[in-house]
Amino acid sequence: MTYCIIQSTTASEEEAKTIAKQLVEKKLIACCSIIPKITSIYTWQGKINEDNEALMIMKTKAELYSKVEKEIKKLHSYEVPEIICIPINSGSKKYLNWIDEQT
């Protein structure tokens, strides 16, 4: 079994919580850690922007990535949401087993 961390930013902590709860309820992710206030500086439509966002750090099985991505796109307020998959190369056996049990 392979595992991954999926990272996404949202416009608010509330939006992050809404998305996370849906993903956990559907057993697509085992857990989502939310960092409620980060500052993101980026270029969008030719303009440099600086916004406060919430960062979602989700843990799941790699095989569920495409379903997680689809669900995030459905629920997200951004036209082009950040959805990045980072492989987990190793981890605590008990924690990885817990991911299996939750998803």
Image (spheres, helix red, strand yellow):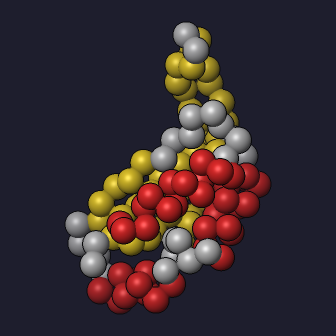
> In this rendering, does residue 82 appear at all?
yes
Front in this rendered view, residue 93 or 39: 93
Q: Is residue 52 above or below residue 2?
A: above
> In this rendering, does residue 55 appear at all?
no
98 vs 90, left or right, is right
Q: Quadrant of residue 50?
A: top right
78 vs 87, left or right, is right
Q: Is residue 85 above or below residue 23?
A: above
User: Residue placed at 59% from the left, 53% from the top?
Assistant: 72
User: Residue placed at 41% from the left, 84% from the top?
Assistant: 100
- Tag count: 0
Q: Position of residue 3 (x, y in %)?
A: 33, 70
Q: Position of residue 87 (x, y in %)?
A: 30, 60
Rendered-image quadrant of the N terminus: bottom left
Residue farthest left in this picture: 89
Q: Position of residue 67 (x, y in %)?
A: 50, 62
Residue farthest right in this picture: 14
Residue farthest top in this picture: 46
Front in this rendered view, residue 70 or 20: 70
Q: Is residue 45 above or below residue 17?
A: above
User: Residue placed at 51% from the left, 54% from the top?
Assistant: 69
User: Residue placed at 67% from the left, 47% from the top?
Assistant: 76
